[in-house]
Amino acid sequence: MAIYRVQVVTGNACSSGIFDSISLTLVGTEGESPKTILETQSPSFCQSLVREIILLRLQREDVREDKQDSLYCDFVVVTSAEEVTYRFPCYQWIEHPWPIELREGTAKTPSMDHLPRLQQHRKEELKQRQQIFRWVQFRGCPEALTGKGTGPPKIKIETQHCKNESVFLAMVAILTFLTNTGLSNAASLNPGSQKSKAGFPLCMSGASNVRRHKNASKIPSNSDISAFLSVFLVPEHVTEYWKRDEFFGYQFLHGLNPIIIQLCTQIPNNFPVTQTMVAGLLGDSTTLQEELNKQRIFLVDYKILEGLSAGLNNGRLQHIAAPLCLLHLSSEGHLMPLAIQLSQSSTSPIFLPSDPEWDWILAKTWVRNSDFHIHQGLTHLLRTHLLAEVFTMATLRQLPMCHPLYKLLIPHIRFTLHINTLARTRLIPKGGLLQKGMASIMYSSLCLPEDIKARGMSSLPNYHYRDDGLKIWAAIESFVSNMVDLYYKADDSVQKDYELQSWIYEIFQKGFLALTSSGIPSSFSTVEEVKKFITMVIYTCSAQHTAVNAGQFDFGAWMPNFPSAMRKPPPKTKGQASLKSYKETIPEINTTANIISVLWLLSAPTGDRIPLGKYPDRHFTEKAPLELITTFQPLTKQDPSLLVAYKYLDPAEMENSVSI
């Protein structure tokens, strides 16, 4: 006979359940104990000695069709009579009558497992997961989670209930507000509505901190979108600066899409900007060619939008442009727009800051609309959400819970499947943009140091997305490198890890559609290759997603700064724009209200946020990895001299995963 003390720790999140009828079986190197019902009053039980405990089997004994209780188990601790402690990470829901087998928490690659029983357990765990988490194809896009599986239907990972409920409640609140105010049905701008100084309805309001006004329910149902002023705080820096060229240039470096700007060393043939056009802007002491030689000219090219359809809005065809924008680094250190062309054709007019006011404002607004499409479809959706889902699926399907890289990655894929599944029908744009983006995506562009170098952006001053991002990348890289070194001592240990090789091959096949042109590896040969790829995965799921997501409400709530649609085609001649024609081009009230609600939902801080560098769930149990986790603290420093403070790569405010 032997005495074992057992502690079952349940989750502290919403709907985690309570300790109920749970049976436990200990599996050791010399047999297994009979199934024993645990009692809260008696945490100890006596069974035959099983020697070293290698597995623990948990099972709900009270599951009935008329009982809907769920139990979320964090971990189980078993202590032997000899005071040897075994910790079994779980971190999953127990909602079904099937037993769950948990391994003792020591991280092991396949070659570290010598017991046939544990080798078989790895295979059985992955076989079951592959039945539950199944791929579905989206033509020309990364594959994703299908809603259909052949496994036990009630198995869940992570705390899905809480995320579903929080997002659902937020969506209900937004839709209720829009319905009560009539904003969801408004069809056009009300010329008699309250105006701002710029002459626009006071609808484009918002900030990173959002709160409901106590009188929001009193807004008349026929009110125009100016009612938003009584519901959201106004982002004063955007409403004040949106027409300024300095702020227009600032957003390419510190706004929502800081990854598209590149150094220009030669004016494109299809964008015939001449010295005569920009001489007055550059001043008498220099020329366009001299500024090109000094690496002070930059280009933003939206060619990927060429030929795409913007679709219908309120039953009317919308319009889309594929502009080019030339920018200059001024002697004061500001990035200033020099010229804008609203198509890829060299015969299109080139708009200049010296043009009539509304010509120039309209041209800049078209660029901001193009930036909206690229940001939402490619920078945000494809390059963070959809790729994070690929990494999540491959991790769940190809790496067992005992694998060190599963333990390393699981905090960074928290809630990703849930949020993507909730938003799937709304996020996937039609018209071919995703397919174009997928065909052109490169591994190097996902690795920040290489991307910065490839775009020629290494030496541009005051580029804080780059500066803060590189610090975070370096911190993640160091953390990952030290962690990988614990388990892979030489390149051959990587080559022999068939689970790791299956993981990267599935990412290559399902996520990057086996496109060798992407540069994504289909296998790993060296330890360094593993370190680089894991660093990219964690950076993408945490820092990169936060950088392109957290500021959406800040920059987008004032609609002229980030319009989601354009009702009239791009101008083909100069001198025709006016405030009236401008308002007839930008989105209508209901379109604006709907997009503001989405931007608020995506940007609002969530109560379940876990910042980068924090790992409340203990998937690792050994001393060495736990010490590395404790010392992993990515830090950045803010620059007080910026026109608007750059805060979107602050680790304290950064999500550990794509969870919203």
Image: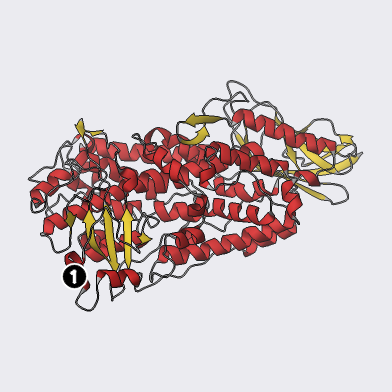
Based on the displayed image, in which of its 4 quarters is residue 263 positioned? bottom left
Q: Position of residue 323 (x, y in %)?
A: 26, 50
Residue nearest the observer in this picture, 453 or 386: 453
Residue nearest the observer in this picture, 212 or 240: 240
Residue ranking furthest to the right: 1
Q: In this view, does 473 lie to the left or right of 24?
A: left
Element assignment for label 1? helix
- Quadrant housing the C terminus: top left
For badge 1, the amino acid type reads Ala
Would residue 655 be visible to someone looking at this image?
A: no
Would residue 658 be visible to someone looking at this image?
A: yes
Query: How many C-alpha atoms fall within 10 Å of the one at disc 1: few (<14), some, or many (≥20)?
Result: some
- Quadrant housing the N terminus: top right
How many callouts does the rendering have?
Answer: 1
Q: Where is residue 30 in the image (x, y as percent from the top left)?
A: 90, 37
Residue at x 31% of width, y 43% of height: 305
Residue ranking furthest to the front: 269
Residue ranking furthest to the bottom: 285
Q: Position of residue 293 (x, y in %)?
A: 34, 71
Residue nearest the observer in this picture, 106 or 11: 106
Q: Is residue 74 left or right of residue 4?
A: left
Q: Where is residue 425 in the image (x, y as percent from the top left)?
A: 40, 32
Q: List the residue tagged with mark 1.
A: 279
